């Protein structure tokens, strides 16, 4: 079993330094795919209400035989349920769908600023934590102004911000803003299409004797970001965990920096419902 480092959030939450992305792993096949990941050593499992697979992830945990307390089961609240009363019901529904008796981590999936309800959603998460439905709470795709508003209005800082991070979109400013506020980071789409075929990624990976996928995940880890690679293959799931002994040099990091070109959806305008 690989030795995965653990990061500690400011509320004391303990998070493995790498997690499994589960988008699109669904049905009986999805349970088998999450099970192989658990067998490989993944203990942080990232799902969402909108992935329609909270039951798959919960079932894989329960069937695995691994002690429940080893896992961080993480889900996300969708935009259509930001209103305070709806948010509480959606969190309860996420819990029922998981089949677990408690959620370990709930994130607001996107801020949806045009609807201006994310502070209400955050209050509902704070209360759900007080009531014991969930152990830790955080956000996803939040920009500094969104972070400051929820912190200012509630006095509660999210344990983490899950954001898009990969060499095409390293997000220096947003990573610095999270770090300044003591907020941990998870990185989504760490294996963004195209990156594994980049000649300089292939060359640096070869220099370290690793695959391009491992190199990209080691790059995320070197930034202090918890990558959430998704794979349906047991072999690639195992490969993706083997990244903690790859040390990138300053020159290699500078070379990888030349790939930066921008990201996907802008949280200021993106509507995720
Ligand atoms: N918060 C948000 O708004 C948000 C948005 C997007 C994603 N996410 C989360 O982040 C997770 C990861 O992002 P993602 O799903 O976009 O994709 P990703 O993890 O960046 O890439 C997944 C793709 O890479 C392939 N792959 C995985 N390991 C590989 C390896 N070692 N070598 C070659 N190919 C490999 C997979 O194919 P195989 O299955 O064939 O291995 C799959 O096609 C999601 O599953 C989700 O949990 C969150």
Image: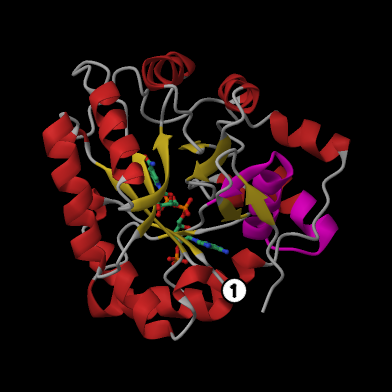
Q: Nearer the viewer, residue 86 or 185?
A: 86
Would you identify the image quadrant in which residue 65 lies? Answer: bottom left
Give above or below for 89 relative to 253: below
- Majority secondary structure in the magenta region: helix
Q: Residue at x 21, y 58 (%)?
A: 52
Residue 109 appears in view? no
Range covered by the magenta-colored residues: 204-227
Would you identify the image quadrant in which residue 115 lies? Answer: top left
Q: Residue at x 16, y 55 (%)?
A: 93
Q: Considering the numbered disc 1 on the image, is that residue within a helix, a strand or a loop?
A: helix
Query: Would you say residue 205 sits in the magenta stretch?
Result: yes
Horizontal relation, residue 16 to residue 103: left or right: right
Quadrant occupied by the C terminus: top left
Residue 212 in the image: x percent, y percent?
66, 56
Q: Residues within 10 Å of mark 1 (few under 14, many from 20)?
A: some
- Ligand 1 resides in the quarter of the picture at bottom left
Residue 226 appears in view? yes
């Amino acid at each position: 079993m690989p030795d995965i480092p653990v990061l500690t959030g400011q509320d004391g939450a303990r998070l493995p330094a790498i997690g499994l992305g589960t988008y699109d792993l669904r049905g009986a096949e999805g349970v088998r795919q999450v099970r192989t990941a658990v067998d490989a050593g993944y203990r942080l499992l990232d799902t969402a209400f909108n992935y329609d697979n909270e039951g798959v992830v919960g079932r894989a945990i329960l069937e695995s035989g691994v002690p429940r307390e080893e896992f961080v089961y993480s889900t996300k609240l969708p935009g259509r349920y930001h209103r305070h009363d709806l948010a509480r019901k959606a969190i309860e529904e996420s819990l029922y769908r998981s089949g677990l008796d408690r959620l370990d981590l709930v994130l607001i999936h996107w801020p949806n600023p045009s609807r201006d309800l994310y502070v209400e959603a955050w209050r509902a998460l704070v209360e759900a934590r007080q009531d014991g439905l969930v152990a830790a709470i955080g956000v996803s795709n939040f920009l500094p102004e969104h972070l400051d508003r929820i912190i200012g209005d509630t006095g509660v800082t999210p344990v983490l911000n899950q954001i898009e991070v990969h060499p095409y979109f390293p997000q220096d400013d947003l990573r610095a803003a999270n770090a300044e506020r003591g907020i941990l980071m998870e990185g989504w789409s760490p294996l963004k299409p195209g990156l594994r075929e980049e000649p300089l990624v292939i060359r640096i990976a070869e220099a370290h004797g690793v695959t391009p996928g491992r190199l990209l995940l080691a790059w995320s880890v070197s930034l202090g970001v918890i990558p959430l690679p998704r794979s349906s293959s047991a072999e690639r799931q195992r490969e993706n965990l083997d990244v903690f002994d790859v040390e990138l040099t300053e020159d290699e990091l500078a070379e990888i920096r030349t790939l930066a070109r921008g990201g996907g959806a802008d949280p200021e305008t993106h509507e995720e419902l």
